[in-house]
Image (tube, rainbow, N blue to C red):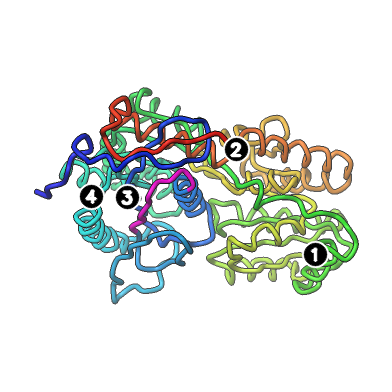
């Protein structure tokens, strides 16, 4: 058994200057387990990144253990597994090779725990929660599970499981067992909170809704003035081969059937058939060649531009080109962080009518029935033709993002959950500092 110093026995190193509120806050050593190729430029990775950076701004020490692939981020301590020689090009999604990846991740996390002696284990996704539970039981360290969607739901979405297949019930049982292992669960939506309680029998006392958030200083509408961002946007449109005078519909995210990529292409075909002038800028990966071929067979070469992967750092610049944003995700259990990026950029947004979309957009979203590409096209056309309404919706969505979806607030919520698990009423639990008024 690994011997670690229990949190209540750690030496207090003193009080250090903080930022705000004049209250005591801890200096914690946080181990994040990310069973994915962090960092890649899409949904769950953005949540991991923004949570880690929000905690760092609050003075916490964060180390991320992840797969061997992925992009390093300046300022983040990342520990990677060794590669497996037979499958070196893994990107996203369910795969039988993830079993080997997760064994290596467990080994790397075990070594990291020995070296760092973390105060909190913060596990992302179900594989991370299973690994984290083993380490938590081994060391007595509290475990927080960041739930971003149903494991079996995602496997069905990716075509890796079938509801009527022989492995669905065993995997559903395993998912339920994993959901009951952590000391606290963070959910990326209120719908996920209800799902855990209703379908998996988790105690509501352990579940803490923490919807995805957005950095509204980073994702913000460009200023409009001559020889400034407007001219830069015109240059970028020209670079991408997008006509200057055509309304632009933007999408940024994974390209997959469950993300509604085929529906997006069908919507573009319908708009062209109706004579609606529109160009689609579809940004993301994988399967770019597959969907580019689908669009070409429908004669949409002049109506759709596929960029492939767009680095997260460039996402605001590319999204700001759009007049309308779209998110035709079919999954009912996963989060949809792209909606928040659209909102922060004041983009009127068309999406399928799912609980998560309703939670983020409220009455300001433009909804189509899930899976109905014709309705999706009609809703997009409505915003293209009614620019006044589109602008009004975009501005209100920006205000909603600023008011309700701040990562700094989310970081404080996470830290409160950490300290609650550790017995925050006893300040000798770990090193502490004072947050002072600005």
Mark 2 vs mark 1, CA separation in Å:
27 Å
Q: Dot 3 surroundings within 10 Å: few (below 14), some, or many (20 or more)?
A: many
Residue 214: % across, % down = 60, 45
Quadrant of residue 76 in the image?
bottom left
Q: Is residue 355 left or right of residue 234?
A: left
User: Which callout, 3 or 2, points at the residue further toward the start of the chain?
Assistant: 3
Residue carrying label 4: 117
Outermost residue, left side: 1
Residue 101: % across, % down = 29, 62
Residue carrying label 3: 31
Q: Secondary structure at mark 3?
A: strand
Q: Residue at x 61, y 47 (%)?
A: 215
Q: Is residue 301 magenta?
A: no
Q: Secondary structure at mark 4?
A: loop
User: Which callout, 4 or 2, points at the residue further toward the start of the chain?
Assistant: 4
Mark 3 vs mark 2, CA separation in Å:
24 Å
Residue 82: % across, % down = 28, 70
- Foreground pick, 157 / 9: 9
Q: Is residue 253 above or below residue 394?
A: below
3 vs 4, front mark: 4
User: Which callout, 1 or 4, points at the residue further toward the start of the chain?
Assistant: 4
Disc sitting over residue 233 in the figure: 1
Q: Is residue 150 left or right of residue 372?
A: left
Quadrant of residue 207 in the image?
top left
Disc sitting over residue 405 in the figure: 2
Q: Residue at x 57, y 33 (%)?
A: 355
- Foreground pick, 50 / 358: 50
Q: Dot 2 surroundings within 10 Å: few (below 14), some, or many (20 or more)?
A: many
């Amino acid at each position: 058994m690994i011997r670690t110093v229990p949190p209540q026995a750690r030496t207090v190193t003193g009080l250090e200057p903080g930022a705000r509120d004049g209250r005591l806050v801890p200096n914690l050593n946080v181990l994040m387990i990310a069973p994915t190729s962090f960092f890649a430029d899409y949904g769950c990775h953005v949540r991991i990144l923004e949570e880690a950076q929000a905690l760092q701004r609050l003075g916490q020490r964060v180390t991320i253990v992840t797969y061997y692939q992925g992009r390093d981020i300046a300022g983040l301590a990342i520990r990677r597994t060794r590669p497996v020689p037979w499958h070196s090009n893994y990107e996203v999604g369910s795969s039988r090779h993830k079993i080997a990846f997760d064994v290596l991740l467990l080994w790397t996390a075990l070594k990291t725990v020995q070296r760092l002696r973390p105060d909190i284990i913060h596990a992302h996704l179900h594989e991370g929660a299973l690994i984290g539970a083993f380490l938590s039981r081994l060391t007595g360290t509290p475990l927080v599970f960041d739930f971003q969607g149903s494991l079996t739901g995602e496997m069905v979405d990716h075509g890796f499981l079938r509801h009527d297949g022989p492995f669905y019930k065993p995997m559903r049982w395993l998912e339920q067992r994993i959901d009951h292992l952590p000391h606290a669960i963070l959910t990326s939506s209120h719908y996920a909170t209800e799902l855990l309680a209703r379908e998996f029998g988790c105690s509501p006392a352990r579940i803490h809704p923490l919807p995805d958030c957005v950095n509204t200083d980073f994702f913000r509408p460009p200023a409009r003035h001559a020889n400034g961002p407007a001219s830069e946007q015109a240059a970028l449109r020209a670079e991408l081969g997008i006509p200057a005078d055509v309304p632009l519909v933007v999408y940024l995210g994974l390209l997959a059937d469950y993300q509604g990529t085929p529906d997006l292409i069908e919507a573009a075909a319908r708009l062209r058939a109706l004579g609606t002038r529109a160009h689609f800028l579809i940004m993301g990966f994988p399967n770019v060649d597959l969907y580019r071929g689908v669009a070409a067979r429908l004669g949409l070469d002049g109506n759709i531009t596929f960029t492939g992967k767009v680095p997260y750092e460039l996402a605001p610049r590319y999204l700001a080109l759009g007049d309308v944003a779209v998110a035709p995700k079919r999954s009912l259990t996963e989060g949809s962080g792209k909606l928040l990026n659209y909102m922060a950029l004041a983009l009127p947004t068309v999406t399928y009518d799912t609980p998560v979309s309703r939670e983020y957009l409220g009455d300001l979203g433009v909804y189509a029935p899930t899976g109905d590409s014709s309705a999706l096209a009609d809703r997009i056309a409505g915003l293209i033709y009614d620019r006044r309404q589109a602008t009004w919706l975009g501005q209100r969505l920006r205000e909603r993002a600023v008011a309700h979806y701040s990562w700094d607030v989310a970081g404080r919520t996470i830290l409160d959950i950490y300290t609650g698990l550790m017995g925050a009423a006893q300040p000798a639990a770990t090193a502490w500092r004072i947050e002072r008024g600005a």
